[in-house]
Image (tube, rainbow, N blue to C red):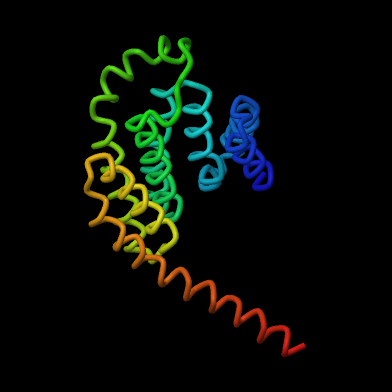
C-alpha cells in the first residue's frame, strides 16, 4: 500500500490528479476497512492535495487541515510539517495567481474563494509558520527551509523578502551537513566490505 500511495501522490504531482485521487481514495478505504488508522499518514496529505488539484478547493483544504491534525495526534511531526507546507503552497499559489483556474473551477469554488482569496497571503503565512514551528521542533530542516522559502516568496509580494531569505539559507546548513554525513556513512560502509 505504501508503494501505491506514492504512486497516487506521483500521479497527482505529475498532472494526473484525478487518477491519483481515485487510487488514493481506494487505499484510504482499504485502510479504513482493515482499521489501519496509523497508516492513513500514507494518503492523508496526498488526498487533500489531489482534491485541491482537481478543483475541489474547499474539500481539499478541509482534508489537509484534518490531515495535519491527525499527523500531530499520531506524533508524526514530518507528516504534519509537510501537510502544513503543502497547504501553505496552495494558498501562496492562490495569492500570487500562479495558476489560473478554469471558469468551471471558479464557479464550483466561488464561496470558498470569496471567503479565502482576500486572505490567501495570511493563510499561506500561517501554514508556513506552523510548518517552520513543527520542523524546527523535530529538526526537519528540509521542510523548514522550504517553508521559509515559501514565506520569503509571500513577503516578496510585499517587498519584504530580504528579511526572510537569510533565515531560509540558515536552515540549509543543517540539511547540507546531514547530506554530507549520509555520504560519508555510505563510503564507510563500502570500505567495511
Give residue 123's quadrant in the image: top left
In x, y percent, where is residue 41? 51, 46
* 72 relative position to 176: left or right: left
Give residue 184's quadrant in the image: bottom right
In x, y percent, where is residue 170? 34, 67
Q: Residue furthest right?
A: 193
Of 144 and 97, the residue lying toward us: 97
In x, y percent, where is residue 78? 44, 55
Of 76 and 150, the residue lying toward us: 150
In x, y percent, where is residue 158? 22, 41
Which residue is located at x 26 percent, y 45 percent? 155
Which residue is located at x 39 percent, y 43 percent? 68
52 to 9, vertically: above or below: above
144 to 113, vertically: above or below: below
Quarter of the picture containing the C terminus is bottom right
149 to 54, vertically: above or below: below
Quarter of the picture containing the N terminus is top right
Which residue is located at x 31 percent, y 58 percent? 165
What count of labels does the image hold?
0
Amino acid at each position: 500500500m505504501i508503494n501505491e500511495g506514492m504512486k497516487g501522490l506521483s500521479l497527482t504531482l505529475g498532472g494526473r490528479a484525478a487518477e491519483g485521487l481515485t487510487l488514493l481514495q481506494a487505499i484510504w478505504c482499504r485502510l479504513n476497512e482493515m482499521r489501519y488508522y496509523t497508516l492513513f499518514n500514507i494518503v492523508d496529505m496526498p488526498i487533500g492535495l489531489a482534491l485541491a488539484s482537481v478543483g475541489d478547493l474547499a474539500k481539499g483544504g478541509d482534508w489537509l487541515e484534518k490531515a495535519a491534525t491527525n499527523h500531530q495526534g499520531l506524533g508524526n511531526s514530518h507528516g504534519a510539517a509537510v501537510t502544513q507546507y503543502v497547504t501553505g503552497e496552495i494558498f501562496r499559489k492562490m495569492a500570487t495567481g500562479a495558476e489560473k483556474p478554469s471558469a468551471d473551477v471558479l464557479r464550483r469554488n466561488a464561496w470558498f474563494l470569496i471567503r479565502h482569496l482576500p486572505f490567501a497571503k495570511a493563510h499561506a503565512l500561517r501554514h508556513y509558520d506552523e510548518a517552520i514551528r513543527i520542523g524546527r521542533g523535530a529538526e526537519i530542516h528540509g521542510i523548514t527551509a522550504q517553508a521559509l522559502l515559501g514565506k520569503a516568496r509571500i513577503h516578496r509580494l510585499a517587498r519584504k523578502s530580504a528579511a526572510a531569505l537569510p533565515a531560509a539559507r540558515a536552515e540549509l546548513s543543517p540539511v547540507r551537513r546531514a547530506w554530507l554525513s549520509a555520504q560519508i556513512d555510505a563510503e564507510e560502509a563500502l570500505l567495511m566490505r
